[in-house]
Image: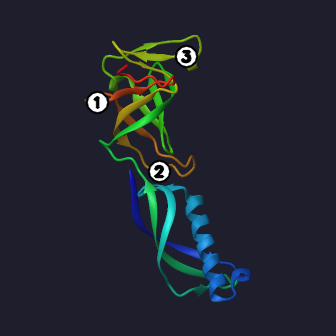
């Protein structure tokens, strides 16, 4: 789920930020953090959480025409990425006839299809926020906390800045953990 990975980026420092060594280092670090936050995530690493360590900086190259200096920076970054077959706890966001969506950290679009929850049946409510999935002893509705297994992981969508993930409730120890009232499934 959380990993620390090594990354490399080109970082541009504007001419007005050039000065003493300390001023230039601060400007480079600010720009690196801003660029990594703006990127949000990548297919290879998942969601970028935080830059932790700068490991090395190449000698800067002056960009002709602008006077900016471009550095190649090696750094470590904490990332968050779901992996196939990983079991996670997630909050139900919405329910419908085909299944339900859950949110787990920055992953707001994990979908559990009706075929991936054996024994559950759909119970429509008077409006979508009251729709439920029920089995013999559990009820799944918006705000329920469920334990799911990651089944499939899609590639990074840079426009929407997210991944699409499919999950399953089929398996041991998967299903409702807590509903929105805080009642455990075991109560």
- Mark 2, secondary structure of its residue: loop
| Between discs 1 and 2, the one toward the N terminus | 2
Res 17 quadrant in image:
bottom right
Q: CA distance from mark 3 to mark 1?
A: 25 Å
Quick check: can you spot residue 174? yes
Q: Which residue is mark 1?
A: 173
Taking the spot 63% from the left edge, 84% from the top edge, the residue there is 22
Residue 180 in percent (x, y) is at: 51, 25
Residue 34 in percent (x, y) is at: 61, 65
Q: CA distance from mark 1 to mark 2?
A: 29 Å
Q: Residue farthest to the front?
A: 187
Q: Residue farthest to the right?
A: 16
Badge 2: residue crowd in 10 Å (few <14, some 14–19, many ≥20)? some
- Mark 3, secondary structure of its residue: helix
Discs 3/2, front: 3
Discs 3/1, front: 1
Q: CA distance from mark 3 to mark 2?
A: 31 Å
Q: Which residue is mark 2?
A: 156
Res 66 quadrant in image:
bottom right
Badge 3: residue crowd in 10 Å (few <14, some 14–19, many ≥20)? some
Taking the spot 51% from the left edge, 22% from the top edge, the residue there is 181
Q: Nearer the viewer, residue 177 or 171?
A: 177
| Between discs 3 and 1, the one toward the N terminus | 3
Q: Which residue is mark 3?
A: 130
Q: Are marks 3 and 2 in contact (CB under 8 Å)?
A: no
Q: Vertical placement of 154 versus 62: above or below? A: above
Where the C terminus falls, by quadrant? top left
Q: Are marks 1 and 2 in contact (CB under 8 Å)?
A: no
């Amino acid at each position: 789920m959380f990993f620390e990975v090594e990354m490399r980026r080109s970082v541009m420092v504007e001419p007005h930020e050039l000065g003493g060594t300390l001023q230039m280092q601060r400007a480079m670090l600010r720009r690196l953090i801003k660029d990594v936050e703006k990127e949000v995530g990548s297919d290879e690493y998942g969601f970028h959480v935080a830059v932790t360590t700068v490991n090395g900086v190449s000698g800067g190259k002056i960009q002709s025409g602008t006077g900016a200096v471009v550095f190649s920076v090696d750094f470590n970054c904490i990332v968050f990425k779901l992996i196939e077959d990983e079991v996670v706890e997630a909050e139900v966001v919405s329910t419908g006839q085909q299944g339900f969506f859950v949110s787990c950290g920055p992953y707001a679009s994990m979908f559990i299809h009706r075929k991936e929850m054996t024994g559950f049946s759909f119970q429509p409510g008077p409006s979508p926020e009251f729709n439920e999935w029920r089995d013999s002893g559990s009820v799944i509705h918006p705000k329920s906390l469920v334990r799911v297994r990651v089944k499939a992981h899609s590639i990074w969508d840079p426009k929407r800045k997210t991944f699409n993930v499919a999950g399953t409730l089929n398996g041991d120890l998967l299903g409702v953990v807590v509903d929105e009232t805080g009642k455990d499934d075991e109560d």
